[in-house]
Image (cartoon, rainbow, N blue to C red):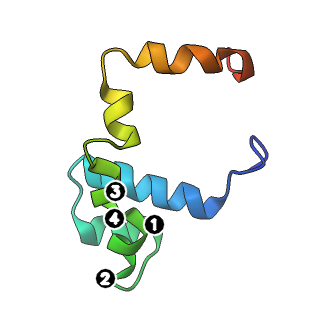
Amino acid sequence: MGADDCETLHGFRAGCAITLALTGADLCEIMDHVGWNRRHTAPYYMQLAKVLRAEGASATLADPDVINVVNPWQDVNTLS
């Protein structure tokens, strides 16, 4: 995709599936949207239990004090 050396379409697909799951989409709809055919594939790649754990990254991002976590990284951020 070119924006980041670590970015892959595989990661984008999993991220899309996680986002759809968190917005309440049905598992069959998610699988159809990202192109998964086997029912065990979706839970394997989404790993929602890890995403939603209390000490996970999503909890950090949801914290009202997230700015204190983000500020140290501002010098490497090239977004405007």
In the depicted structure, whether residue 52 falls above or below residue 71: below
Say if mark 4 contacts mark 1, CB within 8 Å: yes
The residue labelled by disc 2 is 39
Q: What is the spatial separation of the Cα atoms under label 2 and label 3, in whole angstroms?
A: 19 Å
Q: What is the spatial separation of the Cα atoms under label 1 and label 2, in whole angstroms?
A: 12 Å
**Which amino acid, mark 2?**
Arg
Q: Earlier in the sequence, mark 4 or mark 2?
A: 4
Mark 3 or 1: the one toward you = 3
In the depicted structure, whether residue 35 falls above or below residue 69: below
The residue labelled by disc 3 is 50
Q: Earlier in the sequence, mark 3 or mark 4?
A: 4
Element assignment for label 2 = loop
> Residue 30 has which mark?
4
Q: What is the spatial separation of the Cα atoms under label 4 and label 2, in whole angstroms?
A: 10 Å
Point out residue 51 in the picture as x, y percentages from the top left corner: 34, 51
Label 4 neighbourhood size at 10 Å, few (<14), some (14-19), many (20+)?
A: some
Q: Furthest-bottom residue in view?
A: 38
Point out residue 48 in the picture as x, y percentages from the top left corner: 30, 58
The residue labelled by disc 1 is 34
Element assignment for label 4 = helix
Q: What is the spatial separation of the Cα atoms under label 3 and label 4, in whole angstroms?
A: 18 Å
Quadrant where the C terminus is found in the figure:
top right
Element assignment for label 3 = helix
